[in-house]
């Protein structure tokens, strides 16, 4: 019973943002950021649980590789959008460069340090 409670609460964390977003409700920026962050937190739980569950059917290395790919796909989508836009309009070149270098700085500066500290 508690497993279903955890899964259901994680799904509800994601669904609350979807409901707010598609209902057209405009929150203050603070609550919008909080709502988005809570939804990302719930999605991270669901993603990690699905990776653990998939290890029963496929090799662990493949499950972790798929998890890593899913985790970075949104970043790649933003990079591709800015790169495509920069090809049409040169004013997007700075956005594409900043997005790429900023993501690498966060990964190297914060991500790897968090793994070492943990």
Image (cartoon, grey):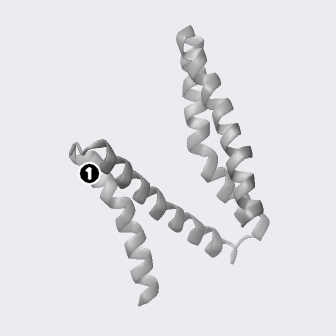
Q: Is residue 95 or residue 81 the one in the foreground? A: 95
Q: Position of residue 102 (x, y in %)?
A: 64, 34
Residue 14 in view here: yes
Residue 59 in view here: no
Pointer 1: residues within 10 angstroms few (<14), some, or many (20+)? some
**Residue 10 position (above or below residue 20):** below
Check disc 1 and report the residue beneath it. 20
Q: Position of residue 82 (x, y in %)?
A: 56, 24
- In this rendering, position of residue 8 left or right of residue 24: right
The residue under the point 33% across, 54% down is: 17
**Residue 12 position (above or below residue 78):** below
- In this rendering, position of residue 52 left or right of residue 24: right
The residue under the point 54% across, 18% down is: 85
Q: Is residue 118 or residue 97 the one in the foreground? A: 118
Q: Position of residue 74 (x, y in %)?
A: 56, 43
The residue under the point 26% across, 51% down is: 20
Q: Is residue 43 or residue 35 the one in the foreground? A: 35
Image quarter in which the N terminus is found = bottom left
- In this rendering, position of residue 21 left or right of residue 117: left
Residue furthest toward the front? 117
- Residue 101: name its quadrant: top right
Image quarter in which the C terminus is found = bottom right
Element assignment for label 1: helix
Q: How many numbered marks are there?
A: 1
């Amino acid at each position: 019973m508690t497993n279903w409670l955890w899964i259901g609460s994680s799904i509800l964390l994601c669904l609350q943002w979807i409901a707010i977003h598609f209902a057209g409700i405009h929150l203050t920026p603070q609550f919008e950021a909080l709502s988005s962050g809570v939804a990302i937190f719930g999605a991270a739980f669901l993603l990690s649980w699905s990776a653990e569950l998939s290890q029963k059917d496929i090799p662990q290395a493949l499950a972790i590789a798929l998890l890593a790919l899913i985790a970075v796909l949104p970043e790649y989508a933003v990079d591709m959008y800015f790169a495509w836009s920069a090809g049409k309009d040169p004013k997007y070149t700075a956005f594409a460069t900043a997005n790429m270098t900023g993501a690498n700085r966060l990964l190297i500066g914060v991500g790897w340090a968090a793994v070492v500290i943990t």
